[in-house]
Image: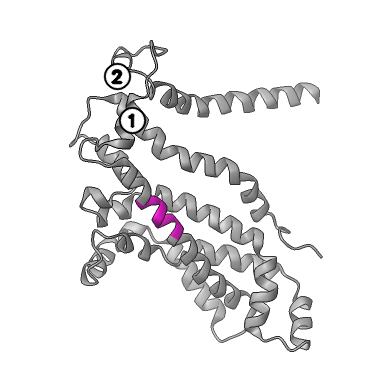
Amino acid sequence: MRLTRTLRYITIIVLALIWVTPLLAIFVFSFAPNSDILRMSLLPTSLTLENYNTVLSTTVRGVNIPRSLVNSAVIVVIQVIGILILDTPAAYALARLKFPAREVIFGLILLTMMMPGHIILMSLYELMAKLSLVNTLPGIFLPGLPRVIGVFLLRQFFRQIPSELEDAARIDGANDWQIFLRIMIPLAGSALTTLTIITVLYSWNNFLWPLVIINSPDMMTAPIAMAYLNSGTNPTQNYADLLAAAFVTTFPVIVFFFAAQRRIIQGLSPTSGINM
């Protein structure tokens, strides 16, 4: 048993080092002069903040990294709020209310998860163009409202809540809306937290749709800005600035993920949030 546990820990540590090493390399060499990177030095010969000063205070190759970070943050906040507002009542209705064709409707909703997103790109772009939302932030975040994964996750959670709670509330005179707001929402705190975390990570890293709908540097999100800096059509010779930009755009989501990973596990637990 002791040998097995030791081997398990060694394996976990090795895998963690394999995952962390590229991030550490990006972080360390983002402070290095560009000459060290071109020489492929194992360690920087000197450290400087000039790379971060360039990335955070000027436009690099036509890309404004601070502006892209602000755009991504705005999109994340709006999508989180919008998805929680839209997905939660939909999931509650599909889980607890009885109406004709409820399971059929839920099946059709799940069917959309099986469709590759690029199939509807052209139709979605035409719709945004008719609404004059091309190259705008609403054009980026509106198609992501609501999210099927949120409806599915919350519906599965609401179905686990004992019906006795709902029956007791109805005996006390509560209607469906009061039950939803005063009983279901407080109990669903962990599931809502999990959905928030998933939405933040998805929205921040979303690449394909912003790439299609955006055509000006001012509207770029963080992933698009980094792709543009590293693209073959717009090469950059200052790799130190590129590494600094990569770390700046990646750091917020890394911190958020590590801070919230325990919440993700708790939210996906079968009995999370239900303490009877």
For marks 1 and 2, the one nearer the N-term is 2
Q: Give the quadrant of residue 123.
A: bottom left
The residue that disc 1 covers is 53
Q: Quadrant of the N terminus?
A: top right
Instruction: Tell whether position 241 is magenta.
Output: no
Q: Position of residue 63 (x, y in %)?
A: 25, 41
Pick the residue in front: 88 or 103.
88
The answer to whether residue 176 is left or right of residue 23 is: right
The answer to whether residue 264 is left or right of residue 63 is: right
Q: Magenta stretch: dominant SS? A: helix
240 over 215 or under it: above or below: above
Q: Position of residue 68 (x, y in %)?
A: 33, 46
Q: Residues within 10 Å of mark 2 (few under 14, many from 20)?
A: many
The residue that disc 2 covers is 34
Q: Position of residue 2 (x, y in %)?
A: 80, 23
Kind of residue indicated by mark 2 = Asn
- Which residue: 33% across, 64% down? 138
Callout 2: SS? helix
Instruction: Tell whether position 73 is magenta.
Output: yes
> Range of the magenta residues?
71-77
> Which numbered mark, 1 or 2, is in the foreground of this view?
1
185 over 98 or under it: above or below: above
